[in-house]
Amino acid sequence: MPTLGRFHYLEAIPPASSHGGGRRGNREAGTLLLIHGFPLTARMWEPQLELARRGWRVIAPHLRGFGGAPAVPAPARSLDDFAGDLVDLLDALHVGEAVVGGLSMGGYIAFALIRRAPRYVRGLILADTRAQADSPEALEARRRLLAAVERVGASAAADEMLPKLVGSRTRTDQPQLVETLRAMILGNPAETIAGAITALMTRPDSQPLLATIACPTLVIVGEEDGITPPPMSEAMQRAIPGAELVVIPAAGHMSNMEQPAEFNRAVADFLDRRL
Ligand code: MLT
């Protein structure tokens, strides 16, 4: 895995002969920056690394403290902390703009980038995410989870999240995927997870931002997503000018891992047509 100072990230580079079936001949199409969900790691994006064959340089960083990345200068406690790290990483890589894709918490962080540093965002992929801030009930559940993570560690987050992350078809047909997710969660330090819970709890309502988004945008959601159900994605698509929506059949919240071929087809089609 490449590292650059404090940054650890997965990377896939287009092969020299790549023409990707796209419209650009042999020209590299640009950078696709993929932001992982809570409380996971960049490894959730492994099935998307093959998008490099379509001519895109794919970069998927471990967010601060996750996946073995160092939590320096301290665990992040706001989505702006994570977004600032991503700007620093893009600067360090000399990438002036990227198509930014985020799943769930990754989508919330993509909104923070749009808010704070829009010039880095050339296109947007919002997967299994929502624009709303936490409701009072959701905040109460987060407080309970935060206390449990501080008391018993990452296993509390795994116990809370795993029953909700994948759809019923995946649970039956791909039980190993749940174990992959469990291993990702258990590998993360409790302080990192606790900081991220605080970041989730304090995130702003991004609904007023949606009408101002000026870049090509794709909204994706698993049809069985119980954490950010399809109606939330439909509302986001309606509110973002020119946005497109793809619903992935037989997938829950982790639509990119549960149905990678469908997910990648949707992303590749969007990139080819709109970027
Ligand atoms: C995620 O997948 O990142 C989380 O479910 C986000 C959340 O809990 O709001």
Image (cartoon, helix red, strand yellow):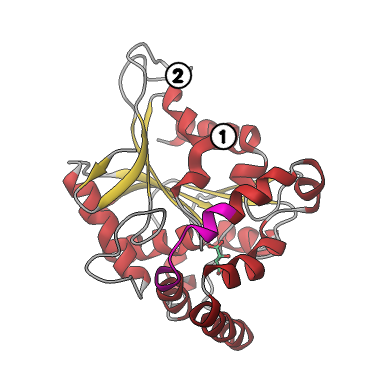
Could you tell which of marks 1 and 2 lies nearer the N-terminus?
Answer: 2
The dot on residue 20 is 2
Looking at the rendered structure, the secondary structure element under dot 1 is helix
With respect to residue 96, does 240 lie above or below?
below
Q: Work out whether residue 138 or residue 211 is closer to the camera in this orientation and state it.
A: 138
Q: Amino acid at mark 2?
A: Gly
Q: Is residue 185 magenta?
A: yes
Q: How many marks?
A: 2
Q: Which residue is mark 1?
A: 264
- Is 127 placed left or right of 212 in the picture? right
Q: Secondary structure at mark 2?
A: loop
**As drawn, 263 above or below 22:** below
Judge whether 68 appears above or below 9 on screen.
below
Q: Quadrant of ligand 1?
A: bottom right
Q: Quadrant of the C terminus?
A: top left
| Image spot of residue 63 (x, y percent) | 37, 57
Give the image location of residue 116, x and y in percent: 28, 65
Across and down, in percent, residue 272 comes to 47, 29
**Residues rendered magenta in the picture:** 183-192
* Label 1 CA crowd tier, 10 Å (few <14, some 14–19, many 20+): some
- Residue at image position (35%, 62%) is 65
Say if residue 117 shows up in the picture. no
Q: Main secondary structure of the magenta part?
A: helix
- Would residue 16 be found to the left or right of residue 239 on screen? left
How far apart marks 1 and 2 lie (CA) works out to 13 Å
